[in-house]
Amino acid sequence: MTLTAVIVVLLSVVFHASWNARIHKMNSPDIVLILSYFIVGLLCFPFFLVDPPTGVTKFLIPSALAQSIYMWMLGTAYRDGSLGIAYPISRGTAPLLIGIGGWVFLSETPSMPTILGLITLVIGLFILAGLGQKIGERKAVLMAAVSGLATVGYSLLDAKAVDETNPLSYFSVIALMSSTTVLCCRRIPFARIKQSFFPAATIGALQGGSYLLILLAFRWAQAGQVAGLRQLSIPLGVFLASEALGKRSWTGVTLVAAGAALVVW
């Protein structure tokens, strides 16, 4: 992995951790998250006009549905719970499910680091889930876990779709469809949307920057290396949130980050 790739991934880590920590401190993180996707989708819309994703229609609706579930569940988890609980559970559930799914359903033989990573992930997630229940955040734990499940769904669909079309054009459609779906289903008053628009633009800029940096990193390093190093966003995000959840939280966060890195490497 080149030094350039490492620097680019670490910048993406900072962007990703920053937007999650920042959005959690806002008054309406659930609404801001939805609007941020809508704004990024609008910014990418010119790519759709130039090169529409016509050949991947079969992926659009299921991916947009999974993205809708993801942003609804994660936003709710951030609104009702601590970042130190919700963020690592959401980020750690996806590699855990992908690792187990490949083993059980695809007959993939996991390597020793993968097995060790899965075990470490399970321990870390159980620690955080137990802590969440102890401090009265059972709903946030559940919502974060469901958002991780949704991440698996749209990640698998998008991985196939972007091989056949322009990624930014495709993402524009997905972001606009999913955010509009959640906005309509939740019937959020226009006054609250207007109030959250500018904070959402800031979050959207960090989201877009993180995503573009990862796309660049994939040109200079293997996907597993990029995904593994990117797990540093978990402890960094919790650190930036500045929550006093104690040593038990940091133990769980560290185990989830290390386990996820081993699974995806």
Image: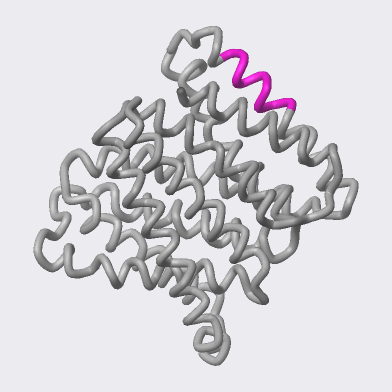
Seen in the picture, residue 100 relative to 235 is either above or below; the reply is above
- Render colour scheme: one colour
Q: Residue at x 61, y 27 (%)?
A: 258
Q: Residue at x 57, y 42 (%)?
A: 91
- Determine which quarter of the picture holds residue 29: bottom right
Seen in the image, is 199 located left or right of residue 39? right
Q: Which residues are magenta?
A: 115-123
- Determine which quarter of the picture holds residue 129: top right
Seen in the image, is 84 located left or right of residue 35? right
Quadrant position of the N terminus in the picture: top left
Task: Residue lying at the far front in this picture: please name it.
Answer: 3
Tell me, yes or no, whether the highlighted magenta stretch contains residue 119.
Answer: yes
Image mark count: 0
Q: Measuring from the top left, give residue 156's x and y in whole percent.
A: 37, 37
- Determine which quarter of the picture holds residue 246: top right
Seen in the image, is 176 located left or right of residue 245? left
Looking at the magenta stretch, what is its main secondary structure? Answer: helix
Q: Measuring from the top left, give residue 202's x and y in whole percent.
A: 47, 72
Tell me, yes or no, whether the highlighted magenta stretch contains residue 177.
Answer: no
Seen in the image, is 251 located left or right of residue 218? right
Q: Measuring from the top left, give residue 78's x and y in whole percent.
A: 67, 61
Q: Residue at x 17, y 51 (%)?
A: 166
Q: Residue 221 versus residue 82: which sits nearer the camera?
A: 221
Q: Residue at x 29, y 48 (%)?
A: 59
Q: Residue 243 versus residue 87: which sits nearer the camera?
A: 243
